[in-house]
Image (spheres, helix red, strand yellow):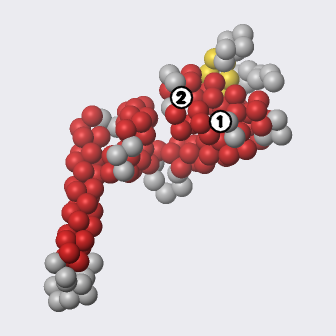
Amino acid sequence: MRFRRDTGRPGSRLAFGRGNRPVERERLLAELASLIQNDERAAETVLEYLRQRDGGVGLLLRALSRRPEVFVPHVLQGRQLYDTPKAIDPKTAELAAVAASAALMCEHCLIAHMRAAQRKGATLDEIFDVLLVAGAIAESSTLSVAFRKFRQLEGKSDETEGSDI
């Protein structure tokens, strides 16, 4: 597979290991559609892009890359959700991912999304605030479930007076 330089189009360029030829991100995505017919090659191209962009590839993506027909659409979906969301800006999308990662206690996701949020302009204070909000929601969720189970242990149903949603 060869990537051609397109100097007439602005955008980030990536240097791939094969001859260190730079590739624009948009060009890469366009080429993926044609690569999908050769799934293993498409997966390796995507992995190389992610390694260069992020400095490595986490366990989830490495594992999914074993099934290129699942991996490639997963990465493309992530790009759409985090890099080009329809109604919010990319920084906000990453901050939402930081919050979800923190609340779900996904350490590797959290690291990746905090770095991505910084790349997209989020400050450390913004990330810190998002972590506080996510922690508060996670704590409330944990306590809510725990107290409902405690009420059941006490022999009370959630349907009794004073129960909340």
- Give the image quarter of residue 47: top right
Residue 14, position as x, y percentages in the image: 62, 22
Q: Of marks 1 and 2, which one's residue comes earlier in the chain?
A: 2
Q: Which sits in the foreground, 156 or 86?
A: 156
Q: Give the class, few, some or many, for how many residues have Cα within 10 Å of label 1's Cα (few <14, many ≥20).
A: many
Q: Quadrant of residue 94?
A: top left
The alpha-carbon separation of the residues under discs 1 and 2 comes to 10 Å
Q: Amino acid at mark 2?
A: Val
Count of marks, rendered view: 2
Kindly identify the amino acid type of the residue bearing the numbered disc 1. Answer: Ser
| Residue closer to the observer: 73 or 21 | 73
Report x, y in % for residue 84: 55, 46
**Residue at coordinates 62% horizontally, 46% vertically from top-left?**
74
Confirm or deny contact between disc 1 and disc 2 (CB under 8 A): yes
Q: Is residue 144 visible?
A: no
Mark 1 element type: loop
Expressed as whole percent of the image width and height from the top left, the position of residue 2 reads 80, 22
Which residue does the image show at 37% across and 38% down from the upper left?
107
The residue that disc 2 covers is 57
- Which quadrant is home to the C terminus? bottom left
Which residue does the image show at 72% across and 13% down from the upper left? 18
Q: Secondary structure at mark 2?
A: loop
Does residue 46 appear in the picture of this structure?
Answer: yes
For residue 159, side relative to residue 26 (left or right)? left
Q: Is residue 91 left or right of residue 53?
A: left
Q: Give how far across and how far down residue 137 sits, in percent.
A: 26, 58
Q: Is residue 21 above or below residue 1?
A: above
Per the rendering, the mark at residue 65 is: 1
Neighbour tally class for label 2: few under 14, some 14-19, many 20 plus, Cα within 10 Å: some
Of residues 148 and 117, the one nearer the viewer is: 148
